[in-house]
Amino acid sequence: MAFLKASTERWDEAVAFSRKAIRLRTISPRALTIHVLALAHTGQCREASFFAAGLRGPLVADSAPVRAVNAKWPELRASCVRIAADRAKQRDDPADGDPPPDDLSTGKK
């Protein structure tokens, strides 16, 4: 399922399915690659970096998708940082245009 979600760029869902695969210990180099891509595309840079480091090991480095991710990691990392910043900004902005809630410490808006 993680592969399907990634192929349709449904990255949040791909993360959920790839995390489940990791918990079930049914992870393959291809699945780990999908996990790294999904994490990076959802702005989860620290976790993506952690798993990307695992892709550099001798047991998985022979896979073509792994080589591709490793080659593009600096670009993917930079993209992840931008996505994380955008998502943080969206969380800080009111979703529906309403003014921010009152500042409880001063009673001001």
Image (cartoon, helix red, strand yellow):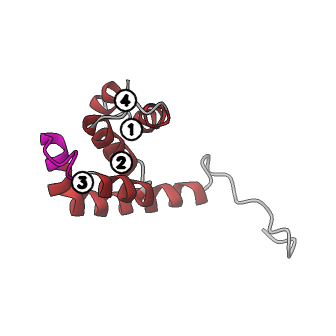
Query: Residue 51, image x and y in percent?
Result: 36, 52
Q: Are marks 1 and 3 in contact (CB under 8 Å)?
A: no
Comes first in the chain, label 2 or label 3: 2
The circle on residue 57 is 3
Q: Nearer the viewer, residue 96 or 43?
A: 43
Q: Look at 80% across and 64% down and name the residue there.
A: 102
Q: Look at 68% across and 52% down and name the residue there.
A: 98
Comes first in the chain, label 3 or label 4: 4
* Element marked by disc 2: helix
Q: Amino acid at mark 1?
A: Trp
* Element marked by disc 1: helix
* Element marked by disc 4: helix
Residue that badge 4 annotates: 2
The Cα–Cα distance between marks 1 and 2, rounded to whole angstroms, is 6 Å
Q: Is residue 108 above or below residue 37?
A: below
The answer to whether residue 22 is left or right of residue 91 is left
